[in-house]
Image: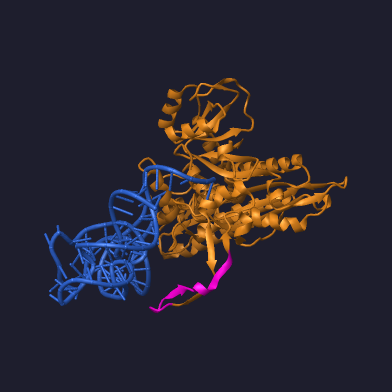
Chain colours: A orange, B blue
Amino acid sequence: MAKEITPRTQDYAQWYNDLVLRAGLADYSAVRGCMIIKPYGFAIWERIRDALDGMFKETGHSNAYFPLFIPKSFFSREATHVDGFAKECAIVTHYRLRNGKDGGIEVDPEARLDEELIVRPTSETIIWNTYRDWIQSYRDLPLLINQWANVVRWEMRTRLFLRTTEFLWQEGHTAHATAEEAVEETRKMLEVYDRFAREWMSLPVIKGVKTEKERFAGAIDTYCIETLMQDGKALQAGTSHFLGQNFAKAFDVQFTGVDGEREFVWATSWGVSTRLMGALVMAHSDDDGLVLPPRLAPIQVTIIPIYKGSESQTALREAGARLEQELRSAGVRVQFDHDDNHRAGYKFAESELKGIPIRLALGMRDLEQGTIEVVRRDTREKMLMQQADLAPKIIHLLEAIQVNIYQKALDFRNENMHRADSWEEFERLLDRGGGFISAHWDGTSETEELIKERTKATIRCIPLDNPVESGHCILTGAPSRQRVLFARAY
RNA sequence: CGGGAUGUAGCGCAGCCCGGUAGCGCGCUUCGUUCGGGACGAAGAGGCCGCUGGUUCGAACCCAGUCAUCCCGACCA
């Protein structure tokens, strides 16, 4: 069985780290809090990126690129925004090094910048400073831009993919003529994220609105998709913000309407990051390795030959290569693992570690009988199939796996979706494996904060399809109109 | 940023208490035999012991600082 992976039940956090490292997704780097995304991990990210990018283009967005550095003065224009990010910014103060006295290298004190540059923690400010020049008339709207970029947030505590100092993401920044249109855009992109999570990542998510306390700094409303990990903790997988006219006012971005009146434009921003990689790992994987949804798996099928004597190698190579070609022609991402350095058993374990959805094993017995052993990663189910007309069966199986791991994750979430009607019940549920807890809340930030202090649980969101239901706040007993979703979160 | 732990070959570790110039397993290289769930044998290569400074005739070992990682808090996507 898999070696060097801590079982989930023993230490979930360690299991996650072991998996990320052993499966070759990422590595620690020489820089605190910053990770190296390794080729296999990056290949998954590329698939995430390409799929999302296609969805953004379909919904009318164009990519652009804005600078990594933001003048400090830009940052201070939107007050709430500064407050939100001030404590986690990296700042560039100098632009030159020189040789030090002791033979080392030091910062040249002569080369101090007149105005310091902030390494972007997010790009609203520099983008809105630019939009001022791009937008004059209603004819320039809507402006639908996305950028794929790295950002830096100086976090106290980091974890591979889930929270790193530097991370990769996409940030959409749009400008609209009306509030309604901007809200619609915010919701539309939330739908895109929802669909992406379900269809590509096999990840069931809950769409909702953040409370004031959890809202993005500078936003009027923050929408989110929240998902549940196997340890019962919630993880925010994506956000979409309705920014109102906050940034337009801060950067004086106005347009002339059809009626000739000048008005501030309405804004949205939305993003998902490499954190999705963490969600992907934690949602589906097991003690033997990753379990990847076929649509995101860099390798969907691996063919492993089982030799017996040197003559069989030639025959198996030919048969394997033929199958590889057949599957590749059918659009399957396939690898023929004919490397003679390892035996089949090793390759089996390795393919499980890497989360390859389907493993095909081909031995002499199969050559004689025209069969092939097919093993799916998600259920471990072994099947003996006929080699003839294999591709359509494999494609069908890949689709079944995609659906199955979604269903499995959905079942898990449903099993861990609780309702609490009293404080005792609320605490008991949190102590018994967590999950989402739907409970009444009096709507105040004070109560929200108190609950967090006492239980570490936060309000993940107010679900979009939330029914109106009168009740009483689980903490204060004050009247409440609806339940909200609590959970301990990443 | 506080509390705790760790850092010795690519990986996992022993050696440190009691200072005398480094070892085990896996992996790697070569050759051979193997091959239906992490093969076996033989021969090799690989380390200024995280880094910097101090104590000492002599430091992986003792002391100080520093950097990094992990766990627990405060902060957050």
B10, A226: nearer the viewer = A226
Across and down, in percent, residue A420 comes to 49, 24
Q: Image height check: is A230 above or below A392?
A: above
Q: Image point 75% across, 41% down: which residue?
A: A179
Drawn side of residue A221 relative to residue A409, left or right: right
User: Which residue is at 69% across, 57% downward?
Assistant: A129
Residue A332 visible in image: no
When the figure is inspected, residue A481 is found, relative to residue B19, above or below; the finding is above
The residue depicted at 51 percent of the width and 58 percent of the height is A40
Residue B10 higher or lower than A300, as above or below: below
Write down the quadrant of residue A146 in the picture. bottom right
Please state the horizontal and vertical placement of residue A399, each as a whole percent of the image. Answer: 60, 44
Between B29 and A77, the one nearer to me in the picture: A77
- Residue A346 seen in the current view: yes
Of the pair A190 and A71, the residue shown nearer to us? A71
Closer-to-camera residue (A308/A292):
A292
| The quarter of the displayed image where residue B10 is located | bottom left
Residue A15 painted magenta: no
Task: State which quadrant residue A471 falls in.
Answer: top right
Q: Which region shows up in magenta?
A: A100-115
Figure label count: 0
Residue sitting at x 53%, y 61%: A91
Horizontal and vertical percent for residue A86?
54, 52
Q: Residue furthest toward the right?
A: A259
Residue A13 location (% of width, % of height): 40, 46
